[in-house]
Image (tube, grey):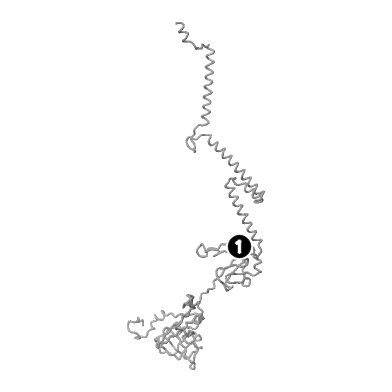
Amino acid sequence: MSEEKDDLFEGLQIMSPEELNSVVESEESEEKEETKTEEESSEMFQPVESEKGEGAYENTDNQTESTTATSSERSEEIYKGLIKELVDANIITAAEADKLDELEGSLDTIKELMTKTVQTNFKAAEEQWKANMPAAKKRFLEIEDAFDEVKFDTAGFDRQVTSGTVGTYAIDRTATNVNHFWITVDGKRLHPGEFTVSGKNVVMSEAIQDTIGGSSVIIITHFTENIIQYPVGFRIFQDMNGNVEYLRLAKDNTTVVTETVEITDTKIYVEDASILPFVNVNSSNPGVVFIGGERITYWEVSLEDNYITNLRRGTAGTGMLQRITPGFIVVDGSKDQELPESTTHTKVWYDAGIHNTPANGLGIQQATTTNANFLKEKQAQVPNYRLELNEKNYFAKDYVVSGYAEDLI
């Protein structure tokens, strides 16, 4: 029994009260240190709620800010180093560098600075090259020659050309008349003699060429030489015997009636009798006028009282007007207005086209044939037949079958 009791208490250490208190205090101290370590660890990685989302750690922003600050410092150093290199290379001045120091030192700023520097230096070199170029030397630069990109003439110029020989400038059409140009050099207008025209080129005089430099502005305005021609007109008249006449309608040989003419009157008063052919009883041919559709011949003219007399009304098969009122035009239809070509009735009056076609398509006003030139000598005045036909006294009563024309009398 005593041996069993000895085995039961084997390995047990019997401590005094003082020893027991010392061990307890030591264990409590160790537990406090472990608790403190865990709290410090939890503080380093404590989840917080922020703008970056739930579960982010407090020290993450501190790390990012530290990294960003380092990157910004490096960019700033690179930026300042680049500015110094540009100043040392005489690309920018110290004053310009001071202004650039105020900008944010980022890579984007550096890229923008480099782009502007290259463009500015290239432009300055180009202008210097132009300024030093002799006036007689040819230069070939970029050409901008295009149609208007906007409607009407709101743009400054139709086309711009910055190439060719100094003092010689090409236009887009052949010109012959220097009076159709308005040319300025740096705002000063040039006059014929200070420039000449050769085909499609405008050539400045030597004196003007000496004043033209790389920065000069030459403005050439050309007014078209295709002047609008006066209208031309002619009358084709076929008489009762089948004879055909081609008569020019000339405004210079046209006047108007000034007093009413009845069917029994022997004189026709006009505004200006001097523009009608002057004839007398000894003339080879009578004077001829057309008033409306009526052909009238006369053998006497009074320049003092402006009338024609010794009349023959309704000739060559034309009808006689019962009353001619003031305002009716009087058109010369005499031999003076006959088209001169003997082949007038059988050939066209136009210029022949390519491969000898009947016409080149440019019309009478651009033609150079004898008949075309004769017509272009005088502006035409075409009678207002509508006004004359609406005149209530145009038709003689019972002259036509009833109902053929409206009776306005």
Q: Position of residue 402 (x, y in %)?
A: 32, 83
Q: Position of residue 247 (x, y in %)?
A: 46, 84
Q: Residues within 10 Å of mark 1 (few under 14, many from 20)?
A: few
- Quadrant that contains the N terminus: top left
Residue in front for this viewpoint, 163 or 294: 163
Q: Position of residue 218 (x, y in %)?
A: 60, 65
Q: In this view, which residue lies farthest toward the front?
A: 355
Tag count: 1
Q: In this view, which residue lies farthest toward the bottom?
A: 282
Question: In the rendered structure, which amino acid carries the disc numbered 1?
Answer: Phe
- Quadrant that contains the C terminus: bottom left
Residue topped by disc 1: 140
Q: Position of residue 359 (x, y in %)?
A: 47, 77
* Picture quadrant of residue 68: top right
Residue found 61% across the figure and 62% down from its top: 140
Height in image: 68 above or below 199?
above
Height in image: 77 above or below 16?
below
> Helix or strand or loop: what does disc 1 sit on?
loop
Height in image: 111 above or below 191?
above
Residue found 34% across the figure and 85% down from its top: 400
Q: In this view, which residue lies farthest toward the top?
A: 2
